[in-house]
Image (tube, grey):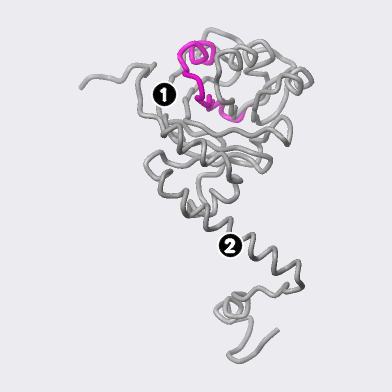
Amino acid sequence: MSQLPDIIREFVRVDADVAAQAGKYQAAILADVAGRRGTMHARVAPVHERMALAGPAFTIEVRPGDNLMIHAAIELAQPGDILVIDGKGDQTSALMGTLMLSACKKRGLGGVVVDGAIRDKLDLLELDFPVFCAGFNPAGPTKFVPGRINHPISAGGTVVNPGDLVVGDADGVVVIERSKAPALLALAAKKEADEAARMEAISSGDTASKWLPAALRAAGVLKEGETL
């Protein structure tokens, strides 16, 4: 049986139109319609709360504290790709900084998600390029440990396959399987419309949730016929 190469160059990406449409929705909306799954651990957060991204995952697995394979990935990724890096959540040294992230922007990538530390925070705030990470550390990485590119990874406690849809905003990052992403758009539109209608009702003074009494009875908190 032949072994997969460490670097996989060709894979199927989520459709660009699907990614563009998904980027119009909050990550929370997409996570809800995806069954409340696929979200990364809260440690993976945007460098600035206004940063947002949406696009196909270009996955990288590295050993903690080594960024050799990230350099290779920057050269291989296509415009619009989101680098998703399994850095094992390590925060003892930075995997990326201004130089590498400037190269990502120059190559037209859609953003970077690092389950690990980065550095040069103030410079990144001026770079105008979406970056999500698990923390910051001024220590630099090594560049000699092999890793893998475009294999399935785990980042922020979530499985990410190359080509999956990745959406990130102020709330964090959600990953949606490529094959399921198109069908979720209509559900996201309905969810957003339902929430807008509910917000309008709240603004008009209707703060009572219609589903709450039944849920409380089902949980045994309220008896049949009893109300709050």
Q: Residue at x 45, y 38 (%)?
A: 18
Q: Residues within 10 Å of mark 2 (few under 14, many from 20)?
A: few
Q: Is residue 104 located in the magenta-colored stretch of the structure?
A: no
Report the magenta residues as a range: 70-90
The quarter in which the N terminus is drawn is: top left
Viewer-side residue, 71 vs 89: 71
Vertical arrangement, residue 59 with respect to residue 41, above or below: above
The quarter in which the C terminus is drawn is: bottom right
Q: Which residue is drawn at 48% across and 55% down?
A: 187
Give residue 163's quadrant in the image: top left
Residue 9, given in percent of the width and then of the height, sits at 37, 17
- In the rendered structure, which amino acid carries the disc numbered 1? Asn
The secondary element bearing badge 2 is classed as helix
The secondary element bearing badge 1 is classed as loop
For marks 2 and 1 on the same chain, the one whose residue lies earlier in the sequence: 1
Answer with left or right where residue 203 lies relative to residue 38. Answer: right
Q: Which residue lies furthest to the left in this view?
A: 1
Residue 133, given in percent of the width and then of the height, sits at 65, 29
- How far apart are labels 2 and 1 at the CA level? 37 Å
Residue matched to label 2: 194
Q: Residue furthest top?
A: 144
Residue matched to label 1: 150
Vertical arrangement, residue 71 with respect to residue 3, above or below: above
- In the rendered structure, which amino acid carries the disc numbered 2? Asp
Vertical arrangement, residue 13 with respect to residue 217, above or below: above
Residue 93, given in percent of the width and then of the height, sits at 67, 19
Q: Residues within 10 Å of mark 1 (few under 14, many from 20)?
A: many
Viewer-side residue, 160 vs 49: 49
Q: Is residue 74 located in the magenta-colored stretch of the structure?
A: yes
